[in-house]
Amino acid sequence: MKILFILTYYRPHVSGLTIYVERLARELAQRGHQVTVLTSQYTASLLQEERLDGVRVVRMPVAFRFNKGVLMPGFIPTAWREVRSHDVVSIHLPQVEAALATLLARLAGRKPILTYHCDLQMPPVWYGRIIDKLTFWDNLIAGKLADTIVAYTEDFARHSPFLSRFGIAECGMRIGDDARDATIPKPKSEIRNGKVRVILPPVIIPDPTPEGVAALKARAELNGKQRVIGFAARFAYEKGAGYLINAIPYILDAFPEVRVLFAGPYKDVIGETIWDEMQPLVKQYEPYLTFLGTLNPAQMADFFRVCDVVTVASINNTESFGLVQVEAFMCGTPVVATDLPGVRVPVTMTGMGEIVPIADAAGLAAGVIKVLKARETYVKPRSEIMRTFELQRTVDEYEALFQEKRA
């Protein structure tokens, strides 16, 4: 098959969405499919076309950027050319061009497939609600035009203002839902036989190594006495880093020696000003904080192994799952995650952590303390986690869906 992915950002940009598409595209290319990623040239230093891990990457120049959104004047002719030369069009939302990309796919006789990664919720700036509304309606049009919409979990699909409009399809594909936990709230009514198919996201991470773990401990200047709390995400408003930092004094009451390790970009993150705004708080708790920046996959495995617990402190539906949770599980590290639709699913499915209230530093601290006091009771074998979140099964399901909908 000739498969086209369309999304706003791709590597080297780091986010859950870009990592998701990178893993899927790379695996499909290794299976012999011709895979193209159509994305933005969000910085001038990037090549407009290159091949990465067997995947052809086409980047369109950006005229200007508004927060995380971009305007690409050449989108229509480039997308039209690429859509017509591919059998399958996979469009990843949220993105500003979603409706236009889906319309072009329909006009070319393709059955557009959307993957909906999260709801968009801008930081509290004056233009935030305007962009939220415009993007929602743009994506809604895309949803109406789409043949199929892929979601990570039934939990998120039921509660998302966008996905809940389309209903969950009755099909034989694997369900990445919350079926093992009846405590997760479900609406009184929901549309069945809809457009939404649920596929658990692609997760892969190498085994940690003793050498890598030792190197990371040395880099972070850990003395072996601290309880190490991890945060693996870009430094963004919706990720809730401030709540984790504000949880430190509560955690210190139970564990006097603590270090919080941040893995991910934190300075000059596209569309974010939170790093500058949080400098007073960062400086206040500086002795307890270490910022490692962006790590490669092998380093991330070592990072998770170094941590005693990893936190997912996200505060809104711009987080719909949290791939880092499963990566941490695979490296033997439990997680404390906020009680958001979709985000609570990995812990619920595995029992490898605790669910805590949203935007609540004291509640987050309580969850961390609970896990640290009985850490070994939360840890499950890597093989057990791998059986639940198997990369090849996720790729199988996408491949089957693409075969079904190919032109």
Image (tube, grey):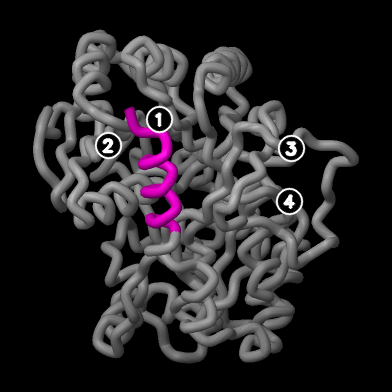
- Residue 275 is left or right of residue 35, and the answer is right
Using a 10 Å C-alpha cutoff, classify the residue at mark 4 as few (fewer than 14 neighbours), some (14 to 19) or many (20 or more). Answer: some
Front of the two marks 3 and 1 = 3
Amino acid type of disc 4?
Ile
Read off the residue under disc 1: 91
**Sooner in the amino-acid sequence: mark 2 or mark 1:** 2
The residue segment tinted magenta is: 394-407
Which of the two labelled residues, at mark 4 and mark 1, occupies the earlier sequence position? 1
Q: Residue at x 80, y 56 (%)?
A: 184
Question: Whole-percent x and y of residue 121?
Answer: 60, 30
Tell me the residue that label 2 is attached to.
3
Alpha carbon separation for disc pair 2 and 3: 28 Å
Magenta stretch, overall SS: helix
Callout 3 environment at 10 Å: few (<14), some (14 to 19), or many (20+)? few
Crowd class of label 1 (few under 14; some 14 to 19; many from 20; radius 10 Å): many
Q: Residue 232, how many percent across, how many down?
A: 46, 60
Residue located beneath label 3 in the image: 192
Q: Nearer the viewer, residue 61 or 49?
A: 49
